[in-house]
């Protein structure tokens, strides 16, 4: 008889959905997430498709379902390091990294108030900072602080420990290893942005006012580094003219040869963010093809009606900076007119390609294709953006499918 526990690797929207659905079918579930909080990329967005909901809409209800279901065991700051065995009988080794904060934490924030050391915020893609002890985000699950010991200032540890009334700080906490036996594994490790610095001609990392699409999301978020204001990093002013560079790293044989599916929609959404703040803000979208699959054709029309968008069919050849104003000159060939054009803008947003997180994992027994997307087989099933580039609703649909396949493996 095989083991009937299901392991879900990854606590983003697809992993959470898979865990909840499997547990509600009466299966024991172990949910493992590398970051200190569940929520994945959705928690970093201002709005997500198809209804343009904030992260609280969708994540909150699922967090409630996790809390109320004793069949789900959640491990954050944890990663799978080894998988062995066969469908129905897998042995999995999990490493749990130290949080240095225990379950006594009530997220009162007293420790953060007395802490002086700071760290660059990965959650904000480097646009902001947090204290050395920080809450991952305002709707973190679990709602517990995490300590980055390397970012502590002199005397911080003593101040933090004395400020905490609940004895929640454990600076001597060490990494732990957990070995579990499961019948099936759902792989939902999500996606990462293509490395923008590999696109030399687009100036990311060289010019301060060239940002990524996910940095744009963090700026637009009410709990982002700018409190929901979209500002130029160079001088914190409001941009009046913004260029969006589509397929930045996607559909390119030298980078990611496939279409990343959601980037066109994301830039249209970003143009609406700008129009919401100032209807006169110009959005210039440089594109190869505008792809708004299926139900999203209506969204394209909405963006065209509500935002001031100029579509330019042409791949961007280079981006240069005016050293005095820090404005950017975008050079591209307009393939419809055949002319080379130069547009001066205040801000450039790179619609970077989506690639799976799996290349960084190197797990024996996990099969991936040439791009790193999970190849599903009996017993180990990929879902969400670990499987292919997808939007949120499609990620959730693949999570449901993955649960059914996992259950089939266990029943067999």
Image (spheres, rainbow, N blue to C red):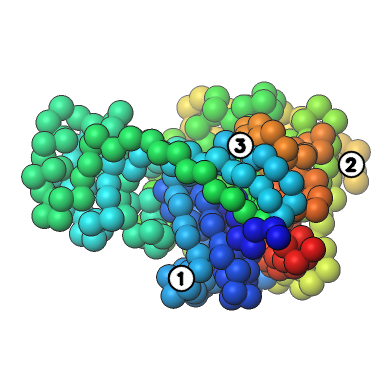
Separation of marks 2 and 3 at Cα, in angstroms: 50 Å
Marks 2 & 3, CB-CB < 8 Å contact: no
Pick the front one: 47 or 75 = 75
SS state under label 1: loop
Q: Is residue 363 left or right of residue 108?
A: right
Q: Earlier in the sequence, mark 1 or mark 2?
A: 1
Residue 336, position as x, y percentages in the image: 90, 46
Evaluate whether residue 72 shows in this view: yes
Q: Which mark is residue 70?
A: 1
Separation of marks 1 and 2 at Cα, in angstroms: 58 Å
| Disc nearest the viewer among 2 and 3 | 3
Pick the front one: 352 or 408 = 408
Disc 3 target residue: 82
User: Dot 2: few (<14), some (14–19), or many (≥20) neighbours within 10 Å?
Assistant: few
Marks 1 & 2, CB-CB < 8 Å contact: no
Quick check: 159 above or below 180?
A: above
| Disc nearest the viewer among 1 and 2 | 1
Disc 2 target residue: 335
């Amino acid at each position: 008889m095989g083991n009937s526990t299901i392991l879900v690797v990854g606590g983003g929207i697809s992993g959470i959905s898979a865990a909840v659905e499997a547990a509600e079918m009466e299966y024991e579930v172990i949910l493992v997430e590398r970051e200190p909080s569940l929520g994945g990329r959705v928690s970093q967005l201002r709005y997500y498709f198809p209804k343009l909901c904030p992260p609280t809409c969708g994540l909150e209800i699922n967090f409630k379902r996790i809390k109320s279901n004793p069949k789900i065991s959640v491990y954050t700051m944890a990663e799978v390091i080894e998988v062995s065995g066969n469908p129905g009988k897998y042995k999995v080794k999990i490493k749990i990294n130290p949080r240095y904060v225990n379950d006594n934490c009530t997220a009162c924030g007293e420790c953060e108030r007395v802490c002086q050391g700071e760290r660059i915020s990965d959650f904000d893609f480097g646009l902001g900072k947090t204290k050395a002890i920080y809450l991952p985000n305002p709707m973190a699950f679990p709602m517990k602080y995490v300590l980055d010991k390397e970012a502590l200032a002199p005397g911080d540890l003593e101040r933090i420990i004395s400020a905490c009334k609940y004895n929640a700080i454990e600076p001597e906490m060490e990494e732990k290893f957990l070995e579990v036996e499961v019948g099936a594994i759902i792989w939902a490790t999500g996606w990462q942005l293509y490395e923008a610095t590999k696109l030399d001609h687009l100036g990311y990392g060289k010019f301060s006012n060239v940002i990524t699409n996910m940095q744009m999301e963090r700026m637009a978020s009410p709990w982002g580094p700018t409190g929901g204001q979209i500002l130029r990093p160079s001088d914190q002013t409001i941009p009046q003219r913004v260029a969006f560079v589509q397929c930045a790293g996607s559909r390119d044989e030298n980078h990611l040869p496939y279409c990343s599916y959601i980037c066109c929609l994301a830039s249209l959404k970003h143009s609406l963010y700008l129009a919401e703040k100032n209807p006169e803000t110009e959005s210039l979208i440089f594109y190869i093809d505008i792809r708004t699959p299926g139900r999203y054709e209506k969204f394209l029309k909405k963006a065209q009606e509500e935002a001031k968008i100029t579509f330019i069919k042409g791949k961007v050849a280079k981006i240069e900076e005016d050293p005095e104003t820090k404005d950017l000159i975008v050079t591209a060939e307009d393939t419809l007119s055949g002319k080379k054009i130069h547009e001066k803008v205040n801000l450039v947003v790179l619609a970077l390609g989506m690639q799976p997180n799996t290349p960084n994992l190197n797990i024996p027994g996990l099969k991936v294709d040439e791009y790193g997307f999970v190849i599903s087989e009996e017993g180990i099933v990929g879902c969400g953006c670990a499987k292919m580039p997808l939007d949120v609703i499609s990620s959730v649909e693949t999570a449901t499918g993955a649960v059914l396949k996992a259950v089939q493996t266990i029943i067999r």
